[in-house]
Each structure stands twice: as structure tokens, then as C-alpha cells.
Image (cartoon, rainbow, N blue to C red):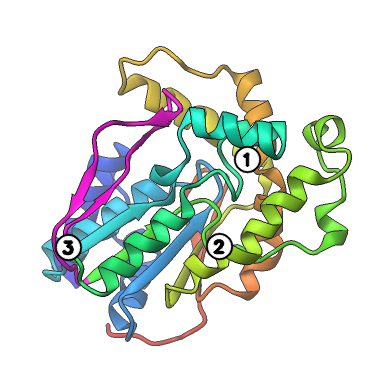
């Protein structure tokens, strides 16, 4: 265990630019690795709100599993399957104007993703998967090639595992976007129908669900803005959203995010509670198995 903790401590320093204590790692990161390694199944959905820290945490866990436990890891991001900008424009003209903006179910190449997961499960290689540039808001020409099976598969994405929203909450206006542009609920009904059908089919291909739970939606704006600045600092693309644009942007995600904070705690197998500083404060494992 000491070797694992020491390795994770160095990884947190590389990832977060600060060194987390060994007690923090033992209490808040090792239980996640414990859950993954003790599972009889090897595929995991990892979800959580924008900016909650999914990508960074998955990177640390994946490197630890690979280096310390010699597990080959494959991480697929739901974000890479966003429809291209032109495809979303066509969808918006056909269904609803709000679908021009990426985010909600229906704005992904979900049939392609389902096909890729099924090919992976049946060891039909190579598999060519898309890549998406968030700053350019478009699909890249470059592809990712999966050539063989891994020991553990992660699918990470903000709404992974989300259950359909009941009509009472779906049709309740919670922000200006819904009040001004979706008065007849067409946009909401569309993405909720997608959740019930194609997305449910995708999520059912995975046996384990890990949820990074934010303390509330109120922190998403700050987190998402920090994420935008970080993405911009690593890219030559100058198409950066300002704070007001992000305030509008996160409203597209608000309904499902709030719904998951309320309902997904009843569905997820592992809940990782995150505080306002994006640090893990507690973990609840509903399968309660340990290898340590």
C-alpha cells in the first residue's frame, strides 16, 4: 500500500500542482481504486458535473492502475462523440434551435459510440474513434485508434448513467434559457426521449457506475470558467468563452445536472462527494467489497 500511496502522491503533485497528504490519499483515492479492482466486471461509467474534476481524477487512477497494478486501461470520453458543428446546426433546424449548442443528450454521435463499445466487447479491432476540440467546438480530423482489449474500460462524461427526468421536473422552468427559448418544452422533451432510448442503451453496456457528486450546481460556473481558462492556456485556439458566455452555456446542462444530484445517488454504485474546492470529502460504496 505504501508504494501505491507514494505513487499517487507524486501523481497528484503532477496533476494538481500540489502534494496531497498520504492520509487524504488513503481515505479518498484508495477506496476508488479498491472499488475498481474488487469489481467482478471491468467496465465503468464515470459521471459528474462540468468542472468537477473527472478528467484529472481518472488520469491519476488510470496511471496508478497501470503502473502499480499492471492493468491496461482504456478511457473513452463521451465528449469526443459530440456531433460536429455543422451536424448540430442541421439538427437544430430540424428539431429545435437549442440543439445547435453541444451538451444535452441528442448532441452526441451516440449510435457510433454504442457501435464502438460493442466492437470493443467483441474484440473487433481496430476501432476508429473520434476526437473533439472544445475550444473550436468541432470534431477534429484526427482519429483515435483502439487496437486491442484492455483490462479496464472507463467511459467518462458529464451525464453518463443519467436516468430519464420525470415530467414534473422536466417541465419546470429553472433558468432563463428554458423560459425564453423552450416554452413548449420541445427541446427538453427531445433530450429526455434520447435519454430514455439511445443513451439508456449505451449506459446498459456498462456494469459499474461511479458518480462524482458536486455539493450543488452553484459551484459549476466557477469550476467551468477555470476549466475554460485552463483549456485556453494549452491551446493556440483563440475562441475562448468569457464569464457571461459560460453563464449562458452552463444553463444547457443545468436541468440534467440538478436532476443527477438529486436522483443519481440512488443509482450509482460508488458516490464520490466533492467539496466546493474540488476535493474529495467522502465516499460511499454500495457494493462494499474491499481488497486492501
Residue on which disc 2 sits: 198
State which tag comes first along the sequence, 1 or 3: 3
Quick check: 57 above or below 154?
above
Q: For numbered disc 2, what is the local secondary structure?
A: helix
Mark nearest the camera among 1 and 3 is 3
**Mark number, residue 165:** none
Q: Position of residue 251 (x, y in %)?
A: 70, 36
For the point 28% across and 77% down, which residue is it? Answer: 37
Q: For numbered disc 1, what is the local secondary structure?
A: helix
Tell me if residue 51 is in the magenta stretch: no
Quick check: 174 above or below 163?
above
Q: Main secondary structure of the magenta part?
A: loop
In the image, 108: left or right of 140? right
Q: Position of residue 252 (x, y in %)?
A: 67, 38
Residue in front for this viewpoint, 198 or 177 = 198
Magenta extent: 125-151
Residue on which disc 3 sits: 125
Real-space CA distance between mark 2 and mark 3, rounded to the nearest whole angstrom: 23 Å
Amino acid at each position: 500500500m505504501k508504494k501505491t500511496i507514494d505513487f499517487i502522491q507524486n501523481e497528484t503533485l503532477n496533476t494538481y500542482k500540489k502534494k496531497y497528504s498520504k492520509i487524504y490519499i488513503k481515505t479518498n483515492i484508495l477506496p476508488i481504486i479498491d472499488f475498481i479492482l474488487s469489481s467482478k466486471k471491468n467496465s465503468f461509467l464515470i459521471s459528474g458535473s462540468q468542472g468537477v474534476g473527472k478528467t484529472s481524477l481518472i488520469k491519476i487512477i488510470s496511471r496508478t492502475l497501470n503502473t502499480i497494478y499492471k492493468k491496461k486501461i482504456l478511457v473513452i470520453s463521451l465528449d469526443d462523440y459530440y456531433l460536429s458543428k455543422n451536424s448540430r446546426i442541421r439538427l437544430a433546424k430540424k428539431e429545435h434551435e437549442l440543439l445547435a449548442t453541444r451538451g444535452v443528450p441528442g448532441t452526441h454521435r451516440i449510435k457510433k459510440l454504442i457501435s464502438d463499445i460493442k466492437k470493443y466487447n467483441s474484440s473487433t479491432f481496430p476501432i476508429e474513434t473520434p476526437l473533439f476540440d472544445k475550444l473550436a467546438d468541432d470534431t477534429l480530423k484526427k482519429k483515435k485508434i483502439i487496437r486491442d482489449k484492455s483490462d479496464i474500460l472507463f467511459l467518462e462524461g458529464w451525464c453518463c448513467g443519467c436516468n430519464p427526468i420525470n415530467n414534473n421536473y422536466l417541465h419546470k422552468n429553472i433558468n432563463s434559457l428554458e423560459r425564453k427559448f423552450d416554452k413548449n418544452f420541445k427541446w427538453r422533451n427531445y433530450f429526455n426521449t434520447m435519454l430514455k432510448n439511445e443513451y439508456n442503451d449505451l449506459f446498459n453496456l456498462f456494469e459499474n457506475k461511479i458518480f462524482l457528486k458536486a455539493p450543488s450546481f452553484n459551484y459549476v460556473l466557477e469550476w467551468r470558467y477555470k476549466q475554460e481558462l485552463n483549456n485556453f492556456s494549452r491551446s493556440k485556439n483563440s475562441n475562448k468563452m468569457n464569464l457571461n458566455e459560460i453563464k449562458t452555456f452552463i444553463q444547457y446542462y443545468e436541468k440534467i445536472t440538478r436532476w443527477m444530484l438529486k436522483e443519481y445517488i440512488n443509482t450509482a454504485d460508488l458516490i464520490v462527494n466533492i467539496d466546493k474546492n474540488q476535493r474529495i470529502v467522502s465516499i460511499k460504496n454500495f457494493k462494499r467489497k474491499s481488497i486492501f
